[in-house]
Image (spheres, helix red, strand yellow):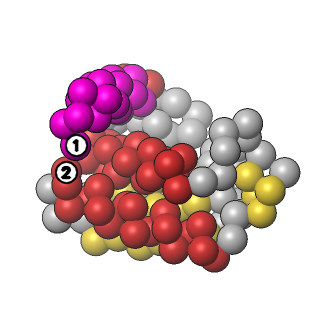
Amino acid sequence: MKTVTAKHFESYKRFCLEWRERLGVHWVELVFEHKTVGDATAQAQLDGSGTVGTLRLCRKWDTPRPLNNATLHRLARHEVLHLLVDQTSQPCCEDGRDLEVERLVCRIEAIMDRETARGNP
């Protein structure tokens, strides 16, 4: 298990801000936390008003994925996508997350990955 350093956390925050700008999620004020997030490596949570989003990054890296900027960039994109779509759903899972929202975020990511592979940022 690796330690997620302050440098990693700063990179994650920078990538989250970049994705907030790219996706136009300007109505959400971002709050960042570097703390344990259960089994997840990262997590996004909107407040009840849908205007404050808390983005968390774990302190301990317990996943086979490499701990590098490419992975942190992808995590940031995934979590900001959740801020974009989460307010449209009602929770149905124990962790409060809608399975359909998770599927939608993963589909959007796959589309974005294909476009990036084609040279379209």
User: Of the residues under marks 1 and 2, which one precedes in the sequence?
Assistant: 2
Magenta span contains residue 33: no
- The correct choice, above or below, for 40 with respect to 37 in the image is above
Labels 1, 2: front one: 1
Per the rendering, the mark at residue 23 is 2
Residue bearing the label numbered 1: 121
Left or right: residue 37 compared with residue 75: right
The residue sitting at the right extreme is 1
Tell me where residue 102 appears, x and y as whole percent.
42, 30
Q: Nearer the viewer, residue 68 or 99?
A: 68
Residue at 44% x, 68% y is 13
Tell me where residue 39 appears, x and y as whole percent.
70, 43
Q: Secondary structure at mark 2?
A: helix
3D distance between C-alphas at marks 1 and 2? 12 Å
Q: Nearer the viewer, residue 102 or 108?
A: 108
Magenta span contains residue 110: yes
Left or right: residue 118 compared with residue 45: left
- The correct choice, above or below, for 93 with respect to 16 in the image is above
Q: Which residues are magenta?
A: 101-121
What crowding class fits label 2: few (fewer than 14 Cα within 10 Å), some (14-19), or many (20 or more)?
Answer: few
Tell me where residue 108 appears, x and y as whole percent.
29, 29
Residue 8 visible here: yes
Give, as a three-letter code, the residue at label 2: Leu
Residue at 84% x, 51% y is 1
Residue 33 visible here: no
Q: Secondary structure at mark 1?
A: loop
Give, as a three-letter code, the residue at label 1: Pro
Left or right: residue 75 compared with residue 107: right
Q: For residue 120, what is the image quadrant?
A: top left
